[in-house]
Amino acid sequence: MRLRLAASVLAAALAAAVPATAIGQDATRYAGRRVDDVLRQLQATGARIIFASNLVPPTLRVKAEPVARSPRDIAEEVLAPHGLALDDGPGDTWIVVPRPAAAPGARRAAEPRAPQKPRATPQEIPPEQPLRIEEQVDVTERPREPAPAPAVHTMAASNVLETAGGLENVFQVLPLLPGVAATNDEEGKLAVRGAGPEHNVVLFDGAQVHSPQRIGDFGTSFVNPAMTASVALDASGLDARYGGRLSSVTLLETRDGRVDRRFAVSGAVGLTSGDIVVEGRVPGTRSASWWATARGTYYKFVADRFKDGDIPSFTDLQVKMTSHPTDRTRLTVFGLVGREKMLRTLAGPRSDQFVGNTLKEFVADNRLAVANLLWTPGPRLTATSTLSLYSNDSRYQDYYNRPSAGPFDRNVRVADFAARQRVSLTVSRRHTVDTGVEVRRLRSQWGMTGWIFPPGLRTVGPSTWGRLIEYDGPIDSEIVKTQTGAWIQDRASIGAGLFVEPGLRVDWNSMTGETAVQPRLRLAKTVGRGSIWAGIAWQAQTPGHETMQQGHQYYDLTGPEQSALRNERSRQVVFGAEYPISRTMTVRVEAYRRMFDRLLQQRQENQSEYERRLARYEIPPDMPPDAALLEYRPTIHPESTATGRGAGVELLLQRTHGRVFGWVSYVISKSERQLYGHTVPFDFDRRHGAAIAVNVQVASRVRVSATSQYASGFPIAPLQPEVRFAEFPNQSSGLLKPLRDGDGDLIEGRYPDNLVRLGLVNSSRLPAYARTDVRVTVAITKWLEAYGEILNLFNRSNFLSRERIGPEPGFDAGYQTEPSFPRLPSYGVRIMF
C-alpha cells in the first residue's frame, strides 16, 4: 500500500511539471569552456540543438558565466558574444544561425540581458556548408531534419549526481531506464533486455573497459560524474561501429578542464567515499586544459555500519589533458591508476589456522590510458584516431573453508591494447558515410583453486566461484588473441522525412578463427512532430576470460574442446516511435525481438565421465530415480550449441527540463533459452518492470529527487529434497555413503548447495523487486552544497541471503530474502572553489 501511494505521488508530481530552473544547473560551470561542448551538454538534457561545425568551431569559448537557467536561454547567452543565436527548426529543434545585425539607431543599452530569440532566413545558411547534428549518437544528417536515434538513451551527468539512490554512480542510475535491470543492488552489473552482464560493452572515451565496477556493499565505479560530459546507453547496439557483444553499449565521455582559470578546486564527500578535483588552463596557452581527480573510500572509519564485517575500499587517480595542436586538430590524453581492496578479519582471538588472521581478502589493480586525436581537415571530413591500453589484475582469496576444504583462491588478469581509426565524410547535405577499422591484442589469465558459495548465487553447473569443479590440480589458463574489425555505415535522407542507414561490420578473431559478417540496417521517418523507426542487426561475440568474469558460469576455455568453440550470435529487430507531447515532454515506445544461437553452455557428461563421478558414491537401491545426482551433469567443458530468444515492449515518458523533470518507464518482456532439452528463462529475465525518477526544484536553493522501482523477481531454481551423503569416504569401502535416520530411511533435505535438477532450472521466481529512495539537496552558497537521502525507504527485502536453517529434523533449509540496502540514511557535501 505504501509503495502504491509513493508511486502515485511521484507520477502526479511529474505530470504537474511547470517550466523553470533545470535541476543541477547550479552545480555546472560554463565560463571558459568550448561552446560546442556546452551545446552538447545541453543536448544531453534533451535540448535538440543543431549547429554547423564551421559556425561553432572548437576555438570558440564561453566568455562569461550564463545567468540563465533554462537550456535555451543558456545557449543564447553563450552564443551571443560570438554573433550567433538560435532559430526555431522543425520538430522542436533549435538551429544555430548568425545573429542578425542590430537595426540602425538602436541603442546598445536597450539590449536585453538574455538575448531574445532571433529569426533567420534560409539564405543565412549557405547550402554548400553541411550542418552537424550533434545528437549523442554523433551522426551527421540533413539540416533541419534530424533523424531519430533508435534504442539510444542519453543522460546528463548532472542526473547521475542528483538521482536519489544512485550513489553518484552511473551504473546504479541506468537500471531506472526501460529494459535495464541491475543483477543486484551491490555490484553495479547490468542485464539489458534479458541478456546477461557478460553481453554488454562499456566504452570510456572510446576505450573498452572490461571491469567498470568496484567491489563493495555500496555500488561504486571508476566513473566520476563530476568529470563526465555525457552518458548514453544503446540498448541494441545497432550502429555498425559497435561490435564484440550481443546486447548493449554504454558510452561514457569525459569533459575538458576549465580554461577560464589557471587553477580551480572542487570536491565532494559522501557517506562512504569522496573525491577531489583540480583543474585549469595549461600555462602559456589559451585553449589547452587539464584536470586531475582522486576518488576513494573510507569504509574503515564507518565499518560498524556494514554487514558481515567486510571492509571494502578503493582509490583511483585520474588525469586528463586537452590541447589543440592546430586549428584543425584536438588531442586528449586520459590516464587512470587505481586499487580496490576488501578485507574481512577473524573476530575474536587470533588463530594460526588463517593466514594473517584473514577470513577473506580481495585486491584488484586497474589501469587505463587513452589518447584521442580529432582531425578536421575540411568542413566535410572528420577523422578520429584512438589508442588505448587497459589492464585489470584481481585476486580473491577466501580462507573461510580452511582447513577441511582448503582456501578459495582466484586470480584473473586482463590486458587489452587497442587501436582504432574512424573517418566521417559528409558527401552532401543529405548524405554522410561513417567508416573505420580497429584492432586489439588481448591477453587474459584465469587461475583458481577451491570453492566458496557466495550469497544469492546457485548455478546449475560449475561456477566462477569454484563450485562443482572437479580439480585435477589448480586451474591456470591463459588466452592470447587478436581481434580486428572494420565497419561502414551510410546515412542518407531520401526525402519526405525518410532516412535510411545501411551498415556492415566485419570482425575476425584468432581464438575461433572466424570471420563474422554482420549487416545492419536502420530506417526512420518523421511523421508530423513525431518520428517512427525500425532496425535490424546481426551481432557476434567471441568467448573469453574478460566476458566470463562478468558472468557466473565457469568454462575451461583453453581445454581440449576449445577448438570447437564458435562465436555467439544474435539477430534482432526493433520498431519504435516517439512523439513530443510538448516542448519539454516526449513519449517513446519501442518493441524488439532477439534470436540467439551458438550460445556458450557447459557440456553434459559423457558416459565415461558419468560413471567415473558416480563411482565415488554408494548408490542405494531405494535412491529416488529422479535424484539430481543421477542426472548427466554439466561439466567445465564449453560447447557452442545453446539457443535463445527474447522479445519486449518498452515505454518511456520523459520530461527533459523545467522545475519538475524526470521520467516514467515501463517494460513487458520475455527471454528464454534452450538448456539441456528444456526451455527455461534467462537468468535475468524480468517479465514486468516499472520505474519513476523525479527531480523537483522546490526553491531557488532546494532540490528534491525521488525514485521508485517495482519489477518481477528474477528466475531461480527451487530447492528440492535430495539425499544427503557423508562428507568423508567410509573407511572400509572408500565410498561416500548415504545418510539414514534411526528407522533406516534415507535422509533428504533442502539445501542451497544441493545439485540443481536440470528440469527445474529457473522454474521458480524470487519475490517482486521494489525499492524507493529520496534525496534532498540544499545549495548553501554558490560554492557549497549539502545533501541527505534515504535508501530503501520502506526497508524492502529484495535479494537472497545464502540460506535459512530450520529447526526441523534433517536441518531442512530454505531461501530467504533480505535487503541488500537496509533502510539507510546517507549524506554528503559538494564544494566548488
Image: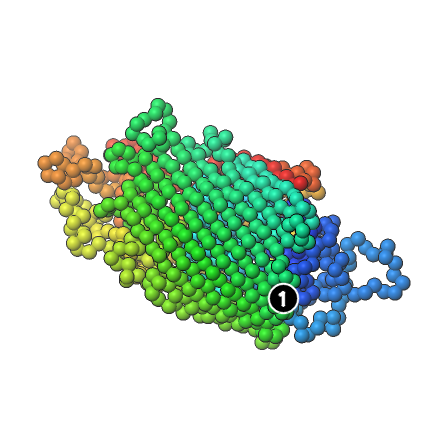
Where residue 8 appears, x then y in whole percent? 57, 46
Where residue 825 appears, x then y in whole percent? 54, 35
Residue drawn at the location 46% of the way across and 29% of the way down? 304
Residue at the right extreme of this rendering: 105
At numbered mark 1, what does the secondary structure look like: helix, strand or loop? strand
Q: Is residue 157 above or below residue 563?
A: above
Where residue 513 appears, x then y in whole percent? 33, 65
In the rendered view, does 400 fall on the left or right side of 669? left
Q: Nearer the viewer, residue 384 or 14?
A: 384
Residue at the left extreme of this rendering: 732
According to the picture, the residue beneath numbered tag 1 turns out to be: 132
- Residue 375 in sight from this viewpoint: yes
In the rendered view, does 380 fall on the left or right side of 316? right
- Residue 551 in sight from this viewpoint: no
Residue drawn at the location 30% of the way across and 55% of the way down? 557
The amino acid on which the numbered mark 1 sits, given as a three-letter code, is: Arg
Residue drawn at the location 24% of the way across and 57% of the way down? 560
